Amino acid sequence: MPASFYRPLALVAVTAAVAAAPLHAEDAAPANSVAEDAASSQPAPPPPAPPPAFAMTRPVYDEAWATIGLGAGLVPSYAGSDDYIAFPLPLIVGRVGGVGVRPNGPGLAFDLLSPKPTLGKRKTRLALGPTFRLRNDRSARIGDPVAEAAGKIDTAVEVGANVAVSFPGVLRPLDTLSLGVQVRRDVLGAHDGTVIEPQVNYASPIGRAVVLQVQAGMEFVDDDFAATYFSITPAQRLASGLPTFTAEGGLNRAGTLAIVSYDLSGNALDGGWSLFGVGGYSRLLGDAAHTPLTSQRGDPNQFILGAGVGYTF
């Protein structure tokens, strides 16, 4: 699943200031009782000190934490398809040994500069680390029989690096805006190409229990990638009946994704069980949209919708 859950931290303030009113002695003593008069003239003892105005809750997000989850979603059967299939949406995000971990589509991205979560003032920071992603377009379940006749493609494993700059408190005190880019290359020979993905990510808590993350990004690919997934060779034309097509690289896709998580305890700080939902839209561009696999058999408009459950500890 794309997208990350970086849960912002917040202070939980507990206000309690109750002062007892001093009791006044009753004016019922005899006038000739000097001792009682003297006693009644003594000042009342001071009221007890009120409890502290603020109390801190210990968050689950400390030196090491993790959220593990699993969901299911509807996704296109291949890039450019208008047939949708159910697909598992695993969730792994956290910080272990000073290294941040977040989802990266069907894969993971690591942050070697991940700071320890803090309840204090946050600063602009740099994120840097390795990343990998599985790409299984037309490798297994292909919803269209004509596209399937054009041939299956081996699963690709793309490995590369991720760099991003994060700005805290852009619109709200606890939000974060990140600008970054990933560069990955296939290492298994499935497409032998390079993928570049610039991304903008915004995350913010909505109340105590809800966290919203919105991501917008683009995907640039080289000629090797485009030829593998979008070209139709003469042999594929004979097998499928689709016209031949020679695809070239360039801007391949642009889109946006939204992720909402809800903590079932009502407090996102204390960990435990949570629900998450995912919704996204992207549009194929360039030869990814012009290939017969998309223009004749599919749709350049691509959607994703899913939900799941996670546990934070």
Image (cartoon, helix red, strand yellow):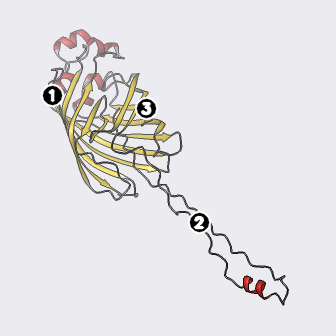
Q: As drawn, which residue projects farthest toward the top?
A: 239
In the rendered image, residue 143, in percent from the top left (x then y), is placed at: 36, 17
| Front tag of 3 and 2 | 2
Q: Nearer the viewer, residue 43 or 16?
A: 43
| Element carrying mark 2 | loop
Identify the residue at horizontal 66%, vertical 82% (top origin): 43
Identify the residue at horizontal 30%, vertical 13% (top origin): 148
Q: Quadrant of residue 290?
A: top left
Image quadrant where one finds the N terminus:
top left
Q: Nearer the viewer, residue 46 or 218?
A: 46
Task: Rate crowding at label 1 as few (under 14), some (14 to 19) or many (20 or more) other CA atoms within 10 Å.
Answer: many
- Give the CA distance from mark 3 to mark 1: 28 Å
Q: Amino acid at mark 2?
A: Ala
In the rendered image, residue 166, in percent from the top left (x then y), is placed at: 28, 51
Image quadrant where one finds the C terminus:
top left
Task: Rate crowding at label 3 as few (under 14), some (14 to 19) or many (20 or more) other CA atoms within 10 Å.
Answer: some
Residue 193's tag is: 1
In the rendered image, residue 176, in percent from the top left (x then y), is placed at: 34, 51
Earlier sequence position, callout 3 versus callout 1: 1
Q: Amino acid at mark 1?
A: Gly
Q: Is residue 163 visible?
A: no
Count of numbered circles on the image: 3
Q: Amino acid at mark 3?
A: Leu
| Element carrying mark 3 | strand
Residue 17's tag is: 2
Residue 70's tag is: none
Q: Is residue 47 left or right of residue 31?
A: left
Earlier sequence position, callout 3 versus callout 2: 2
Q: Which residue is mark 3?
A: 305
Identify the residue at horizontal 32%, vertical 51% (top origin): 177
